[in-house]
Amino acid sequence: MDLHEHVGDAGRGERVLLVDDEEAFRETMARALARRGLVVRCAESGEQCLEAIETIELNVVVLDLEMPGMGGMAALAEIVRRRPALPVIVLTGYGTMARGVQAMKAHAADFLTKPVMADDLLAVIHAVLHGPEARSA
């Protein structure tokens, strides 16, 4: 598994695993989050995600729902089973209220639809890790 790390100039912040099969989105978002002080590792599939949660230290997973092979809902269920304290923020380009409710019932910490701006995702990451008051910080 080749998970390269994106680290910005701001140092070593929260450790994020960004899981998305769309390479352009994954790399662009990883660089944007790294510039905002996060340490971002990337995975392109649910299978890579599950390997990563077992082998690297993480604070949060950002997980796309719609991926070939093991989809995001199956990966979410496995993350919850293997690492129940690890928060997962779910992303999808196919966002509907029903998908959001389904993900939240499966213990996702939050749900966002794509396209998503890096600052919006960063605010949700901070809120999930540090409480709702961190969203506006």
Image (cartoon, rainbow, N blue to C red):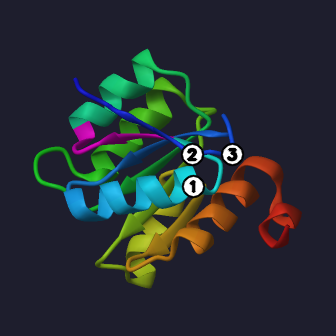
Residue 19 shows up from this direction: yes
Residue 88, how many percent across, how many down? Answer: 52, 48
Graded by Cα atoms within 10 Å as few (under 14), some (14 to 19) or many (20 or more), the crowding at tag 1 reads some
Graded by Cα atoms within 10 Å as few (under 14), some (14 to 19) or many (20 or more), the crowding at tag 2 reads some
Nearer to us in this view, 66 or 32: 32
Q: What amino acid is at disc 2?
A: Gly
Res 75 → quadrant: top left
**Which labelled disc corresponds to residue 10?**
3
Nearer to us in this view, 125 or 87: 125
Disc 1: which residue: 35
Nearer to us in this view, 4 or 136: 4
Q: CA distance from mark 3 to mark 1?
A: 7 Å
Q: Please determine whether, in this image, residue 34 is positioned above or below residue 81.
A: below
Are the residues flagged by discs 2 and 3 in contact, CB closer than 8 Å?
A: yes
Mark 2 vs 1, N-terminal side: 2
Res 2 → quadrant: top left
- Which residue is rendered at x = 38% and y = 77% of the image? 114
* Magenta segment boundaries in residue numbering: 40-46
